[in-house]
Amino acid sequence: MTVMTPDAGDDERPAGRAAPGGRDPQGVPRQAGAAAGGAQEALELAPEARPPEEAEQRGIWQKLRRGLTMTHTELIDKLGAAFEGRAVLDDATLEYLEEALIAADLGVDTSLALVERVKRNATRDQASSPARLRKLLADEMAGLLEELPRRPAREAAGLPQLTLVVGVNGVGKTTSIAKLARLAQQRGQRVLIAAADTFRAAAIEQLSLWGERLGVEVIRQPFGADPAAVVFDAIQAGRARRVDQLQVDTAGRQHTKEHLMAELGKVRRVIDREAADWQRRTLLVLDATTGQNALAQARTFSQVVPVDGVLLAKLDGTAKGGMAVAVARELALPVLYLGVGESADDLVEFRPREFAAALLG
Ligand SMILES: Nc1nc2c(ncn2[C@@H]2O[C@H](COP(=O)(O)OP(=O)(O)OP(=O)(O)O)[C@@H](O)[C@H]2O)c(=O)[nH]1
Ligand SMILES: [Mg+2]
């Protein structure tokens, strides 16, 4: 099977262009409307998948749509092409669908599972219209995500929550901490940040700057200090200030670097001991622009550090947004948040139905 790679910028689709996967469009009768208008046809969203009316919800929906633009464009283009010249959900169309999903980085297994569901559940009516097929695909994608184990119980009444943010270098950990702090602030929660990336002086400065911008206190020690000591201090400060949220930044590390992983183990032990009565979670940040590599990275990373959930950053810079589905399904890790830009407001909580509707709508 040919695996298509996203070819951004190639939005011209000449009528005679050969379809990937060896399909020959020659001689296939063209279906009026399905071919030319297929890519542009509007998705008939189910009531529950329509953009919500409330201002805050509308803002979230817009961020999500913006963040998924590149993936959405690629996917819709390819799905339109899958129907080019035909109006049946036959083997060739299904194969083409599968390739479009794989190209959006849903992963091979997940793409196969999704196409299987579409094949099984499509009515004749749905199979004959690209827009209705997309709607079915969105529903099946949301269904597949909703069948996965739910996120761990969170925010038990009254207990502070500590979030340890981990991941390899440059994925977006520090920026995501600022975003998480902002989200908590918007909910009227008291937030504290721990600068436990003491590996680079610039990292402490970067976080302190975010703290100033957001009006959030950052617990820090000089460059080179023991990260576990910073975390210890931050937990004591969090107790004294009665915070609701403590976000802990850590240095980027490759899972293969043993001493850095050992350091993370030490930080976790301090957290488990000092914040034993708090809600504690470890959030793995992944960079969506690295596609399947991030998936492989997460797989090995989570073998070393127990991970409670994933924050998928930089979704706005990639056509590989389907990775959120692959992470959830193939790693069996709950995707909790999506990063959709560089500002503190560019974070959305992951919700399967809205995600699928934004991706395919
Ligand atoms: N477009 C976009 N850029 C992002 C997003 N999240 C982070 N970035 C950018 O990615 C770059 C790295 O972000 P950091 O937050 O410093 O990453 P980090 O994981 O803390 O990096 P290290 O501490 O060096 O391991 C910065 O330029 C951020 O502005 C996002 O969701 N979208
Ligand atoms: Mg950082």
Image: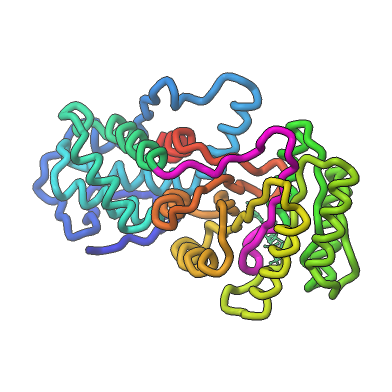
Residue 241 magenta-highlighted: no
Colouring style? rainbow
Q: Which residues are magenta?
A: 148-173
- Residue 269 shows in this picture: yes
- Of residue 39 and residue 240, the one placed in the foreground of this image is 240
- Find residue 118 and report its image quarter: top left
Name the residue rendered at 44%, 23% in the picture.
48
Quarter of the rendered image showing ligand 1: bottom right
- Find residue 273 and report its image quarter: bottom right
- Residue 179 shows in this picture: no
Position of the N terminus, as image quadrant, is bottom left
Name the residue rendered at 17%, 40% in the picture.
89
The percent position of residue 170, horizontal first and vertical second, equals 66, 65
Q: Is residue 117 left or right of residue 192?
A: left
- Of residue 33 and residue 196, the one placed in the foreground of this image is 196
Q: Is residue 108 left or right of residue 162?
A: left
Q: Is residue 225 above or below residue 350?
A: below
The percent position of residue 17, horizontal first and vertical second, equals 24, 54
